[in-house]
Amino acid sequence: MQTKIPATIVTGFLGAGKTTLIRHLLENAGGRRIALIINEFGDLGVDGDILKGCGIENCTDDDVVELSNGCICCTVADDFIPTMEALLNRETPPDHIVIETSGLALPQPLVRAFHWPGLKTRVTVDGVVTVLDGPAVAAGTFAADIARVDAQRAADDGLDHETPLSELYADQVACADMIVVNKSDLLGDGTAPLVARLKSEAREGVQVVPATMGALPADVLLGRGQGAEDDISARHEVHHHHHHHDDDHPDDHGDHHHEHGHDAFESFIVDAPEVTDPAAFAVKVADVIRDHGILRLKGFASVTDKPMRLTVQAVGPRVDHYFDRPLGGDPRGARLVVIGQAGLDQAAITQALQ
């Protein structure tokens, strides 16, 4: 059976740091072949120039495609679908596709486009990541520079909707599988209250993660397996609207070394006895994830009296488990990788999983 290629949609207002997050992802892709589609406007493809020719392994100029003919959510048939089909038809298709939307585009119409006949059997929405400017959201302005956002709107000749920023923001958050509170280093003690508020406002299962300079591990952003195109009814839109062009603040692009790195995250391995009841084990894993705020959990296990290996994949509280191949000479037992924000109670998590 053909395996669908996963695609991640990255959305958020101008200046939130989407390009910085994507560049960090490329620099830490772990050998994945990632293709980028950037919804850029105007004569200067700012994001594309930053990402093209940057010397990142497994990311060539041919892997960065710019769409500059209008807002991506309104040029689906003319631009987005042909671009996707061209990527999928390559002799060596990408392992993952990342789509950076314009700062004033809606993710919902883009998600629906994955039902297009040429795409629905070949690619799936692995997840929608909404990047927020933490200090701006905390201040109730949603974007750091409102004047620049207004300039975006004025420069778009094809603009046919005028929508308040609060409604655009609500739609981007409503569609998210993960909300990244970027620039959290500027929030200080205000980070935790903002994260808690956003969690309370988001639909069940959405993860809210603080970040500095978009420095999130690839395993946190990718491999989420959401299949968002089959869950669009849960991603309510306030209005159907769109807008235009995103080139994150130049300051966001100034430092590509990301001194903060992954210091805010940690991962560790838990070795445990073999599983006796896969369904009960999945429930237990989900409970541990909820109790400790784990972002990702993945690994393998043997099951008592079964010759097949059990694969366990968890994104937030959603746990998938299935038999994938014979154990062969693999040792019996369970080995699980736990990924979360720094400060996880490793001893308590290990004890609970064992």
Image: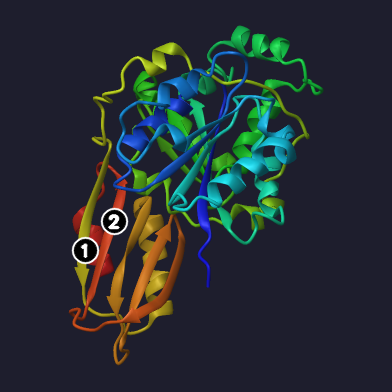
- Residue 58: give its label: none
Q: Which corner quadrant holds the C terminus?
A: bottom left
- Amino acid tagged 2: Val
Kindly state the secondary structure of the residue where label 1 is placed. Answer: strand
Residue 175 occupies which quadrant of the picture? top right
Residue situated in front as seen by the camera: 102 or 129: 102
Residue 345 on image: x %, y %: 23, 51
Q: Earlier in the sequence, mark 2 or mark 1?
A: 1
Q: Is residue 4 left or right of residue 240?
A: left
Three-letter code, disc 1:
Val
Relative to 342, residue 204 above or below: below
Q: Nearer the viewer, residue 98 or 190?
A: 98
**Residue 70 in picture, x, y percent from top left:** 69, 25
**Mark 2–mark 1 distance (CA, rounded to whole Å):** 7 Å
Q: Residue 346 in the image: state x and y as whole percent.
A: 21, 54
Q: Residue at x 34, y 59 (%)?
A: 297
Q: Quadrant location of residue 21?
A: top left
Which of the labelled discs sits on residue 270, or is there none? 1
Instruction: Where is residue 61? Give x, y as percent.
Output: 42, 31
**Above or below 69: residue 144:** above
Q: Residues within 10 Å of mark 2 (few under 14, many from 20)?
A: many
Q: Are marks 2 and 1 in contact (CB under 8 Å)?
A: yes
Q: Name the mark on residue 338.
A: 2
